[in-house]
Structures are given as C-alpha cells and as structure tokens.
Image: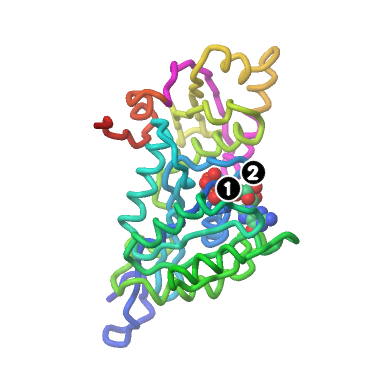
Amino acid sequence: MNPDRPDLQPGDETPTRAGFVVLVGLPNVGKSTLLNALVGEHLSIATPKAQTTWQRVAGIRTEDSVQMIFIDTPGLISSRQLFHRSMAIETGRAVAEADVVIGLLDGGARKSRAELEGVHDLLARAARPAAVAVNKADLQRFDPAAARRLAGDLGLPLYVVSARTGAGLEPLLEFVASQLPEGPFLYPADHLASAPARFFVQELIRESVFERYRQEIPYAVAVRIEEFREGEDPVYIAASLHVERKSQKGMLIGKGGTGIKSLGAAARAKIEHFLGRRVYLDLWVKVSHGWRRRRKGLAMFGYVVPDAEA
Ligand SMILES: Nc1nc2c(ncn2[C@@H]2O[C@H](COP(=O)(O)OP(=O)(O)OP(=O)(O)O)[C@@H](O)[C@H]2O)c(=O)[nH]1
Ligand SMILES: [Mg+2]
C-alpha cells in the first residue's frame, strides 16, 4: 500500500510520479517568486534586487498522485568572481539532478542576446524534459517575443505566467506532471520543504537586509544561526551577520544602533509569521574579512566552494 494514499486499495492505484523540477534563469526574472507561488508558501526569499538567491531552495507540491519538488536556483551570471562561480556551480548541480528543467524569462525586461545565450545553452545542454516560461505577464510592458524565439529555437513548449498573480500556473503544472518519472513520493505528502527551519530563518534575515540596505551591503552580509532554542517561549534565536569590512559594520548597525534595531524588528516579524510562534531575535554583527573572496569564507557559511582554477 502507498502510505501517502491510504484511500486506495492495492491494485487500483494510479502509479505515482515524483521528481525534481529546477527553475533556472537570469537574475531577477522571478524564479523565487514563482517557487513560492507554485508551493503556496513564502519559502524562497525574493526582492527587487538581482542576485537575492545564493543557494538552492526546495519547495514541495503534492497533489493526488504527483509530487513535484521545485528547486529554486541562483540567477545565471557569467563572472569570474569566486562567489559568482560558487553560485553558478550550485545552479549547475541542480540542473544535473533535475527531472524537468524550466527556463524562466522576464517578459517585463529587455535582455541582450548575449545574456539570453546563457539560458539557451543551459537548456540545450540539459538533455532532459524542459520548457520555457515567460514571467510577469501582469505588467503592462509585458512582451513575450524573446521567450517565444528561445522556445522556438529549442523546440520547447512555452508557458506564459505571472508568479505575482498566479495566472497561467495550471498549464505549466500539467506539463510538469506529465514529464515526471513514475516512482514513489520522495517526501511525506504534507511536507512543503526539505530544509530545516533554521535555514529559512537565516534566509528571512537576509531578505530583511536586502530590503533595508542599499548598494553593496546586501551582497556583503552572510547570516549564520548561532542558537535556535525551539523549546522556549518565545523561541530564542541568535544570529550573526558577517560583513566583509569594518566600515560595513558601522553601516549595518547605523547611528546609535537604529539600523540594526529596525532590521531586527523586521526580520523578527517575518520569522514569527513563518514559524507561527513568538520569537526573541538576537543579532550580532561581525567582520569576516573578504569572506566572499575566500574559499574558507564560503565554506564557513555553507556555500559551494569552487575548485582552484588550473
Ligand atoms: N510584476 C511582477 N513582478 C514579479 C513577478 N514575479 C516576480 N516579480 C518581481 O521581480 C523581482 C525579482 O523576483 P525574484 O523572485 O527575487 O527573482 P529571482 O529570479 O529569484 O532573482 P535572483 O534570486 O536574483 O536570481 C521581485 O521584485 C518580484 O516581486 C510577476 O509575475 N509580476
Ligand atoms: Mg531568487
């Protein structure tokens, strides 16, 4: 018997399907917003700034006999910087493990041919079922022409969606369900996420940093959860925020500590909503010199460490 389908008798089950559906695309096209819309929960942080997502984030959608594990990925960027290479490796690994790949484009922003080439090449090389989706259909300036060209060139189906309004998601979901391999569910049917709560807490703090600070600050801040005491009420959480330079520490803390105070209040509200519990949030700012440029720095925060270049 299928433990997730106690309503069915042996012999009369529709075979279950399950697998990984990877969302890839340029930065800021709405991959994280789409993952959240597909799962119905704010799991992956999404902000107006490019390169918000630094790691894979999984969100699980189970309906009837199909389990889709959507994987959000860092936006594709070609850059030799160590941390950008780390993110590109992360995205590449997700695609290598995918059962279905969705190449997402932004119908509200013009992109150069060179930029779109990266998406084209990735989808062409992926060698697995794939589709092109063009997002932000709710915008007045929406133009699907580039996405239509890309889908046409690759011989892939095209879906028009709005991650913000949820328009157009059903046909995309039907396509995904039809392409997934037959097999048992990989997670219990009521699970929405695979990462532990502390991962989401760390990300919600990063989201607050992205929303409240400008210029280089959001990109310089790594967050580490130092303590997470769920047995207490309110839940006690201590997190360290690591900047790259001493001057950034002052910018993060702000005059008389006002910056870090209001950051803490904003992040705490998000975390309380996510956990459905009251939270005491303790934030500490530290300097980890140039952490993004050092392999040790990336390892310290759990990011992929690229091999040394030949
Ligand atoms: N109008 C509109 N805006 C959207 C839609 N989907 C996403 N956005 C906005 O686009 C911006 C980027 O969204 P994200 O989901 O963070 O984009 P991403 O592709 O994950 O970006 P990276 O993590 O940087 O690669 C945010 O301001 C979103 O609110 C949509 O369907 N319509
Ligand atoms: Mg993202």
Instruction: Point out the residue furthest to the left here.
Output: 310
* Label 2 Cα crowd, 10 Å radius (few <14 / some 14-19 / many 20+): few
Which quadrant holds residue 148? bottom right
- In the displayed structure, 231 sits above or below 189; it is above
In the image, the residue with mark 2 has its CB under 8 Å from the nearest atom of ligand 1: yes
- The reply, left or right, for residue 70 in relation to residue 138 is left
* Rendered image: mark on residue 28: 1
In the image, the residue with mark 1 has its CB under 8 Å from the nearest atom of ligand 1: yes
- The residue tagged 2 is 48
Instruction: Say whether disc 2 or disc 1 marks the residue closer to the N-terminus.
Output: 1
- In the displayed structure, 42 sits above or below 266; it is below
Which quadrant holds residue 270? top right
Q: Say whether residue 283 is magenta.
A: yes
Residue at (68%, 26%) from the top-left corner?
262
Q: Amino acid at mark 1?
A: Asn
Q: Position of residue 255 (x, y in %)?
A: 70, 14
Tags 2 and 1 touching, CB below 8 Å: yes
Q: Which residues are magenta?
A: 264-292
Quick one: 260 or 276, which is closer to the camera? 260
